[in-house]
């Protein structure tokens, strides 16, 4: 198994004709690695009723980078964050602050590396309720003791809401900590076949696999309900895809038409 994976890795990295370029690590590679069969096999085993190919922003074939392990969604976020950091530099913005929930290691490295490289006045903090190596231990449903109202210019909250008991409270808290005119990346698994959001407090892992697609998820949103809950929290939401980032960037990152970035904005008081 290890030998097979090592072979595959070498092929991805060194084979001639490297048509891809990962936006997170910048390496040119021949191909991305597929999603682990751990997920596909479990979904099948526990009878997940939706088509796994109908998840937005989940490229089963071009899932992770063989160099930095960035997932397809990490590569999508890096495209947006790269533009954001350039804006901070060009507009000479001061004291820009970013909060990253449940941070992904490749993306954290990308952000820290670029803040340093561009010598930007950006405060970047990571947060999680359980992970050890983060700046702040924070419950996303109750952040007011840790952060202030209107504290951050930008947040990343990716694949968190499907884990928390009260996602509406979490959304309200996210709105509170964001500055007026601030924005954030807000992502959750969306399967386009789902018509009504399904949620439950069950702790039965087999049932969670079957209903929500993962052992530690407690809900699976329908797209329309997800957008509604975001709006109800006060956010304006934009959906950015290939047209926004450009076909070439999508192609070299192994992204597809199904890769959609949800960017939420807290409109200013004017
Ligand atoms: Zn990479």
Image: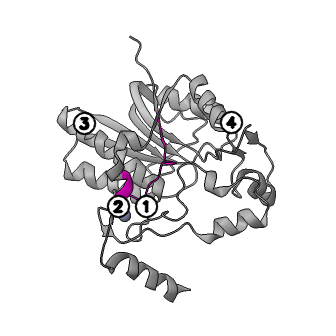
Q: CA distance from mark 4 to mark 3?
A: 34 Å
Q: Is mark 2 within 8 Å of ligand 1?
A: yes
Q: Residue 105 lies in magenta, yes or no? A: no
Q: Which mark is residue 265?
A: none
Label 4 or label 2, whichever comes before in sequence order: 2
Whether residue 144 can be seen here: no
Q: CA distance from mark 1 to mark 3?
A: 23 Å
What is the image's colouring? Answer: one colour
Q: Nearer the viewer, residue 19 or 144?
A: 19
Q: Which mark is residue 166?
A: 4
For the residue labelled by badge 1, is the local secondary structure a helix, a strand or a loop? loop
In this view, 112 is above or below 34: above
In this view, 54 is above or below 143: below
Q: CA distance from mark 2 to mark 3?
A: 21 Å
User: Is 193 situated left or right of 47 in this image?
Assistant: left
- The residues colored magenta run 250-263
Whether residue 50 can be seen here: yes
Q: Which mark is residue 22?
A: 2
Residue drawn at x 20%, y 53% as measured from the top left: 117
Q: CA distance from mark 1 to mark 2?
A: 8 Å
Q: Is mark 1 within 8 Å of ligand 1?
A: yes
Specify the farthest residue to the bottom: 3
Q: CA distance from mark 4 to mark 2?
A: 35 Å
Q: In the rendered image, which quarter is residue 74 located in?
A: bottom left
From the top left corner, tell me how far across and down residue 39 is, in percent: 65, 65
Which residue, given by chain and number where applicable, does mark 1 sit on? 70
User: Is 90 situated left or right of 187 in this image?
Assistant: left
Which quarter of the rendered picture does the N terminus lie within?
Answer: bottom right
* Circles 1 and 2 in contact, beta carbons < 8 Å: yes
Q: Is mark 3 within 8 Å of ligand 1?
A: no
Q: Residues within 10 Å of mark 3 (few under 14, many from 20)?
A: few
Which residue, given by chain and number where applicable, does mark 3 sit on? 87
């Amino acid at each position: 198994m290890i030998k097979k994976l090592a072979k595959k890795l070498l092929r991805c990295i060194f084979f001639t004709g490297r048509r891809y370029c990962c936006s997170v690590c910048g390496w040119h590679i021949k191909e991305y690695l597929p999603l682990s069969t751990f997920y596909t096999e479990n979904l099948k085993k526990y009878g997940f009723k939706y088509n796994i190919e109908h998840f937005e922003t989940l490229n089963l074939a071009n899932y992770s980078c063989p160099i930095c392990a960035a997932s397809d969604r990490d590569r999508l976020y890096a495209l947006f964050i790269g533009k954001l950091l350039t804006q901070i530099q060009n507009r000479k913005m001061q004291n820009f602050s970013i909060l990253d929930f449940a941070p992904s290691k490749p993306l954290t490295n990308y952000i820290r590396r670029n803040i340093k490289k561009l010598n930007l006045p950006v405060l970047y903090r990571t947060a999680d309720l359980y992970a050890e190596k983060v700046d702040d231990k924070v419950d996303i449903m109750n952040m007011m003791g840790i952060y202030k109202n209107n504290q951050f210019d930008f947040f990343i909250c990716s694949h968190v809401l499907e884990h928390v008991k009260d996602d509406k409270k979490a959304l309200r808290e996210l709105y509170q900590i964001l500055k007026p005119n601030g924005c954030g990346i807000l992502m959750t698994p969306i399967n386009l076949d789902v018509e009504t959001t399904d949620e439950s407090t069950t702790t039965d892992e087999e049932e969670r696999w079957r209903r929500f697609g993962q052992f530690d998820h407690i809900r699976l949103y329908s797209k329309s309900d997800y957008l509604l809950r975001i709006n109800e929290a006060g956010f304006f939401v934009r959906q950015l895809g290939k047209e926004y980032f450009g076909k070439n960037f999508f192609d070299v990152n192994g992204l597809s038409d199904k890769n959609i970035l949800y960017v939420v904005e807290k409109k200013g008081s004017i």
